[in-house]
Amino acid sequence: MFFKPPILALFIGSFLISGMLLYSAFYAIQILSKWDIHSGSDTQLNLERRTYLVSTIMAYALAFQLFSFFLFIYTADHLHTFFTGAMCAAGSLNANKWGYPVVLLKVANFLLAGLWLIVNYADNRGYDYPLIKAKYTFLLWITPLILVEAVIQGLYFGGLKPEVITSCCGTQFTAETTSIASEVIALPLTAMEIAFFGGMVGTLGLGIFFYRTGKGGYFLGGASLLTFLISVAALISFISLYIYELPTHHCPFCILQQEYHYLGYPLYLTLLGGALTGLGAGVLMPFRQVPSLKEILPSIQKRLSLFSLLFYAAFTLIVVYEMIFSNLRM
C-alpha cells in the first residue's frame, strides 16, 4: 500500500517542502535582522539577491502545499478498500488517530500558504520590496505548522495497518456520536439553511461592494472566513443529504467518489478558493498606504474579490442545483 504513487508523491512532496521551508526560514531570519533597503553594503546586496531565490523556492513549495490537500483526500478515499468497515475516506482517516488531524492541518495550511503567496505576489509588484519583512515574518509563523503537518502525515501513513477494523462514515457522522460532527448534525436544519444562505448572500454582497468601491476589505476577509466555516458545517448538516438523497447520510467524503460524479472536488475547490481569495483581499488592506503599492494594490484586491465572488457563487450554484434536482424532500 505504501508504494502507491499518490502516497509516494505526498511523502516526497512533504520532504521537499520541509527542506525548502527550513532553508527559506534560515534566510528569513537574516533578512529580518539585517535588511536595510537604503544600504548599499555587500550584506544588503547579497540579501537582495537571496530574496529572489527564496521567493521562487517558496512559490513552488507552497503551490505544491495547496495541491497536496486534494492529493491527500484523493489518496485517503482510495485507501478505504484496504480496511474492513471503511466505505470512503472517512474510514481510512479513522484507521488511526492521525488521520483527521492531518486533514485539519492541511485545510489550515492551504489557507495560510495561499495567503503567503498572495502577499509575496503583492510584494513582488513593488519596486522597493515593501512587504519583505511582513512576508518573512509570516513565513516563520507558518513554517512550524507545515512541518508539523509533514510529521503527522508521516505518522498517519506509517501507522496504517490493513488488519485494523475501522468504522464507516455512517457511524462517524451521526448525531448519536460524541464529536464536533455530531454537534453540527444535531443543529436544527432550518437554522443551518438560513445561516448558510444568509452568510453566502452577505459575503457575495460585501464582495460586490468591495469590487465596486474598494471599501470594506476587512469585512470581506472576515465574512469569507466565517462563510467558509458555516459552509463546511452546512455540507455536513444538510447539503450532503440532498446529494446522497438520503436523510441520514451526512458524510463529507463519499461525494469524492465516482458514484456521485466526484462532486466533492469542485465543492472543496470552490469553497477553499472563495475563502482564500476573500481572505487575501482583507489581508492586503493594511498595506494600501505603502507608497510603492498605492497604485498597484487596489487592482490586486479587486481581482481577488472577483475571484472570491466567482468561487462562492459557483459553490452556491452547485448546492442549489443539487437541492432542486434531488429526489429528497425535507
Image: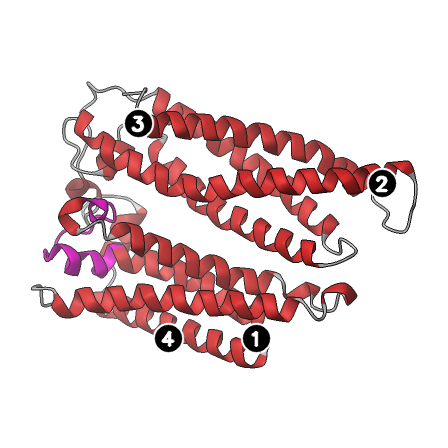
Label 3 belongs to which residue?
Answer: 96
**Of the residues under marks 1 and 2, which one precedes in the sequence?**
2
Secondary structure found at label 4:
helix
Label 2 belongs to which residue?
Answer: 45
State the image quarter where residue 88 is shown: top left
Label 4 belongs to which residue?
Answer: 201
Label 1 belongs to which residue?
Answer: 216
Residue 226: % across, % down: 44, 63
What range is drawn magenta here? 236-257
**Of the residues under marks 4 and 1, which one precedes in the sequence?**
4
Q: Amino acid at mark 3?
A: Asn
What separation in Å lies between label 3 and label 4 (alpha carbons)?
A: 39 Å
State the image quarter where residue 95 is shown: top left
**Residue 214, relative to residue 23: is it above or below?**
below
3 vs 4, front mark: 4
Number of marks in picture = 4
What separation in Å lies between label 4 and label 1 (alpha carbons)?
A: 16 Å
The quadrant in which the C terminus is found is bottom left
Q: Are marks 3 and 2 in contact (CB under 8 Å)?
A: no
Mark 1 nearby-residue class (10 Å; few <14, some 14–19, many ≥20): some
**Left or right: 155, with 20 as reference point:** left
